[in-house]
Amino acid sequence: MSLIKRNLSGICLAAATLACFLFFFFRYPNHLFHKEQMLLFMYAPAFLETYLQKPAGISLLIGDFLTQFYYFRAGGPLILSVLLMLTGLASYRILRKWLPPMIALIAIPVIMCWEAGRNCILIYPLASTVSLLVGMSLFLLWQKIRVRTLRLVLSALFLAIAWFGFGYAAWVCLLLMIIHELYKKEWAGAALLCMAFFILPAQSIPATTFWGRPSFDREHIFALDKALLDNDKTALNALLETDYQMNWNSFFHNLHRATENRLPDELMQFYQPASQALILSVGPESSYLSILFANEFWFRAGDMTMAEHCAMLSMIFSPDHAGTRNLRRLAEINLINDDSAAALKYLRMLDKTAFHKNWARRQMALLEQQESDPAQMQIRKRIPDSDYLRKSGDVTGSLRHLLQCNPDNPIAYQYLLSYALLNKDLTNFFADYRPDYMPGRVFAEAALIVLAQQQQLTPENLRKYQIPPYLVQQFMQYNEMYNRDPEDIEALQADFCNSYWIYYHFAVLPS
């Protein structure tokens, strides 16, 4: 028992560190992976020199260097838990000088959880944790100076080092210095240090927030995004089984189903907030995540102009205005467009990274051999062979243009019809419907509504639009129940919950 008491601080620190690692490894790994995707860290002298020109340059350099290892599932949790452990250890050694041992001990997990919560924020850089740790470490080194006069003289040097190299570490260090002097009742020293508040320039970089907490909804979306990038259909299907009623969740549902040509049958089997989750908006009010995810659809549909537009915008509006993911997408777009000069520009940048250079070198080798990646060749078949003057928000026109250039574009076809159906635009749906190309239950249900409205429910039309007899019978049953009591939605949903008829009658479109 005495042994445990003597090592209680170490046990508490180890337990908190293990808890942080397990949390980020099992519950929050995709958030960390996304941070790496939005970062560009190149091993090039000219690039590394730019850190010396930035405020808190050393802190940013260390933070970005470590963040690149978030590429690995265990890399981010390991690095973050070690930094949090060192932060907890430094906090304990500081607080132990001023507070009872037990209170200082309790502060270890509290401070570690506080900093871990800040790292759960998407725009919070790892450099901020580095700055916090450096600020506390400099104070611990400063307070070891026993000669009081020398300690006060050297405080200016310590604060200058902290401010120029580590940003807000200077404020952390200064605050601890003042508390130390007040605790020692060195009033003159405390007053002298307080003057630094008026001398030290305001510097919040790289700290971006004081408080943060996990967002498991966003983590779920990042998990879907990573599964899509990895083409991991098993993980994607497992994630899509969860009932998250969010626009982005429905977006990945639609894209995955369309990729497998299942959208005509399964469009209504999950939450659909009209067409907002089918094609994400790209405009002044869109977030960079919305623009980034929208790029995934346009790229797979074959619209390289829109895909490049989204990749550029998401890179501009991302926290660091860069990102290996966007560079890779821009390289892929130009490879598909057969613009090798533009593609090489991005590939050479990726070639200077630690974990994306292998992919870049494979693509450059294929260029030298005048060959193409099979996946890129598949998308190249879908790109239009003529120009199109796009109007803002004209989704229907863009998709029709893709189909006019290449009628055998399954993703564009499914999205064109689904976009009309989710907007209850049956006129455009019926004008573009080609049942011989890609029939489906939802499309047939919508066709029945149009034929009924036109009073053309004839055997010839049913055969023409490939509508099975059982679906016609269900349509008659639905109409009978609806005409009997149009407001009895519960009874209708009990028998026709996944039908387009329910959506057509009861879904409220956004204004």
Image (cartoon, rainbow, N blue to C red):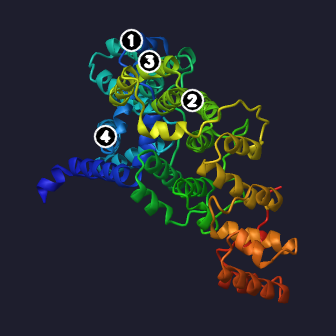
Q: Nearer the viewer, mark 4 or mark 2?
A: 2
Cα distance in 3D space between marks 1 and 4: 35 Å
Q: Position of residue 11 (x, y in %)?
A: 22, 51
Q: Secondary structure at mark 2?
A: helix
Answer whether residue 459 is visible to the viewer in this image.
yes
> From the image, which quarter does the N terminus lie in?
bottom left
Cα distance in 3D space between marks 4 and 2: 24 Å
First in sequence: mark 1 vs mark 3 = 3
Q: Residues within 10 Å of mark 1 (few under 14, many from 20)?
A: few
Q: Position of residue 300 (x, y in %)?
A: 55, 43
Answer whether residue 95 is visible to the viewer in this image.
no
Q: Are marks 1 and 3 in contact (CB under 8 Å)?
A: no
First in sequence: mark 1 vs mark 4 = 4
Q: Which residue has dot 3 on it?
A: 57
Q: Nearer the viewer, mark 3 or mark 4?
A: 4
Residue drawn at the location 39% of the way across and 48% of the way down: 29
> From the image, which quarter does the C terminus lie in?
bottom right
Cα distance in 3D space between marks 3 and 4: 23 Å
Q: Which mark is residue 157?
A: 1
Give the residue type at disc 2: Met
Give the residue type at disc 1: Leu
Give the residue type at disc 3: Gly
Q: Are marks 4 and 2 in contact (CB under 8 Å)?
A: no
First in sequence: mark 3 vs mark 2 = 3
Q: Position of residue 278 (x, y in %)?
A: 66, 53
